[in-house]
Amino acid sequence: MAQVLLEKKGNVAIASIDRPKALNALNSSVLDELDALLDAVCKDKEIRVLILTGSGEKAFVAGADIGEMSELNPEEGTAFGKKGNDVFRKLETLPIPTIAAVNGYALGGGCELSMACDIRICSDTAVFGQPETGLGITPGFGGTQRLARLIGPGMAKQLIYSAKNIKADEALRIGLVNAVYPAEELPAAALKLAETIAANAPIAVRACKKAIDEGLELPMDEAIALEETLFGSCFGTEDQKEGMHAFLEKRRHEPYQNR
Ligand code: CAA
């Protein structure tokens, strides 16, 4: 039975980790399914934004599967970490924007999964944390790297060393999430944000993602040059012509065609 579900609403796709009995914990087969889903999303030219969430009321994802990890040896542990990292990196480098709609526990691999998305919003019931040191391991699906980059090394170290969970309001305060919604409003808020993004010129949106993500890895002069190239490439698109002509003609632009 599928453990990762995909639903499409117009140009938005919603992927749900669907293993609620284990609070959507990530075992190898869930990771394989997520990997295949990302390939399918990448190929589907209709999809302009991907939302990631968890099935059930309680959890986004409560971490990597502790049962599966409990008896691993160092080589197997390294391989399990690589398996998760490869999938999360595929998610992070997906050309289209991604939104984590964090609807409950986002612990360990769950917090890491949300951080591999471009944008995080959450319910007021969400709980974030990296509990790994309390289990005798380090975060293993990118947590030491992405948390430090997102919220700064000082706060990341406090969360990771202490293994203490934080609630939604604290996640908002430290910049781990962009917004908090009452739990029942989160799916609609995520969809509204996704639809807003999907209505903008898709080639330009994808170029922005590339410019930000790849530019952050470059010295400023090279990063600016990357932006120039991407900016210039937009002028070869039909959507740029329509968007600017519509403005000048004082009319609403036609729906963007992704061309
Ligand atoms: N792995 C495997 N099973 C898990 C799980 C996990 N990460 N989290 C929850 N479950 C299972 C529980 O074992 C339980 O199963 P049974 O009903 O068969 O006993 C079921 O989900 C429900 O969980 P609880 O009964 O514990 O629910 P609760 O409401 O009392 O507590 C919770 C919720 C606080 C999230 C608690 O489940 C918990 O602490 N889970 C583990 C969180 C964690 O440590 N995550 C990090 C894992 S390590 C990691 O992710 C490494 C990495 O970076 C790759």
Image (cartoon, rainbow, N blue to C red):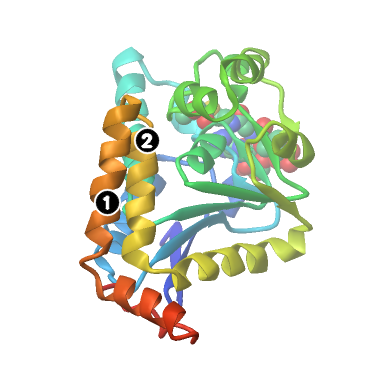
Q: Which residue is mark 2?
A: 84
Sequence-wise, the earlier of marks 1 and 2 is: 2
CB at mark 2 closer than 8 A to ligand 1? yes
Q: Which residue is mark 1?
A: 230
The reply, left or right, for residue 83 in relation to residue 229 is right
Q: Residue at x 29, y 16 (%)?
A: 75
Can see residue 62?
Answer: yes
Which element type, helix, strand or loop, lies under badge 1?
helix
Instruction: Give amino acid for label 1.
Output: Leu
Can see residue 10?
Answer: no
Q: Residue at x 28, y 46 (%)?
A: 228
Residue 57 at x, y percent in the picture: 70, 57
Q: Nearer the viewer, residue 170 or 214?
A: 214
Check disc 2: other Cα within 10 Å, few if <14, some if 14-19, many if 20+: many
Residue 82 at x, y percent in the picture: 31, 29
C-alpha separation, residue under disc 1 versus residue under disc 2: 31 Å
Instruction: Give amino acid for label 2.
Output: Gly
Residue 101 at x, y percent in the picture: 59, 54
Furthest residue in direction front, as rendered: 248
Residue 125 at x, y percent in the picture: 77, 48
Q: Nearer the viewer, residue 195 or 243?
A: 243
The reply, left or right, for residue 233 in relation to residue 91 is left
Check disc 1: other Cα within 10 Å, few if <14, some if 14-19, many if 20+: some
